Image: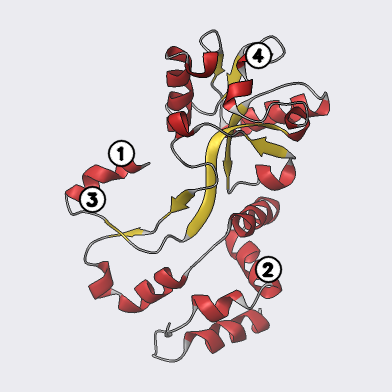
Amino acid sequence: MNPMIEPFIKAGLIKVMEPPNLTGAKYTLAVPEYLSSKGLKSLNDIAKLEKELEGKFYGIEPGNDGNALIQRMIDKNEFGVKGFELVESSEAGMLAEVQRAARNQKPIVFLGWEPHPMNVQMKIRHLESGDSVFGPNFGDAKVYTAVPPSYEARCPNVVVLLKNLQFSTDLENQVMVAIREKSNSVQAARAWLKRNPTVLNKWLRGVKTRTGEEGLPAVQKSLTAG
């Protein structure tokens, strides 16, 4: 994503805050876990299973950057996949195809990332050795908060909160699943915080309410009341 945001940073329109709010994210090709146990563990293993995979990679909607990276990999014959076809669909369509394949223990390679509910709802493995295509992000991708350059001066209290927020891929996977099940992000977030209240100690350190009181007791009271 760096090339997409870099022009805005150089133009002074966006400031990327430190530290990252999430580390350990992934963005690469993935397979069902049963394929991993059969030896498909990295991009280097794909070409030798071309026949079983029917020469196909499953991506999401046309124009997506992940699809473009897969197509470039095919065009450049990286990892010996020149004869493969990229099947473009949608996120829901791709995952439906993966689930269909999983029910029949059929080989399939698809665009996978974490955090995402797919990591909870299915047993999958993110393939290794994809740094030359997807960047050095196999478990090392970071997510940052971006704000207008003047935001810190205008909203210092919120900036304290933003700098405190530290998530994990497991946390986000679980909350994303809950959001889909509840269809309400606020309810899902409140439910997770009730089950994991200790994270608030760090997230709300130094954060005040709009009236200048300590933020932690206020949030704890709100969760109890809810």
State the residue lying farthest toward the left. Answer: 11
State the residue lying farthest toward the right. Answer: 104
Whichever of callouts 3 and 1 sits on the residue coming sooner in the sequence is 1
Whichever of callouts 2 and 1 sits on the residue coming sooner in the sequence is 1
Which residue does the image show at 40% across and 70% down from the upper left?
A: 163
Alpha carbon separation for disc pair 2 and 4? 46 Å
In this view, the mark in front (2 or 4): 4
In the figure, residue 56 lies in which quadrant?
A: top right
Residue receiving disc 1: 3
Q: What element carries label 1?
A: helix
Residue receiving disc 3: 9
Q: Which amino acid does label 3 sit on?
A: Ile
Alpha carbon separation for disc pair 2 and 1? 37 Å
Alpha carbon separation for disc pair 4 and 3? 43 Å
Q: What residue type is labelled 4?
A: Lys
Q: In this view, does 103 lie above or below 171?
A: above
Asked if residue 179 lies left or right of residue 8, the reply is right
Which residue does the image show at 46% across and 20% down from the upper left?
A: 73
Specify the label residue 48 is tagged with.
Answer: 4
Specify the label residue 191 is tagged with.
Answer: 2
127, 187: nearer the viewer: 127
Alpha carbon separation for disc pair 1 and 4? 33 Å
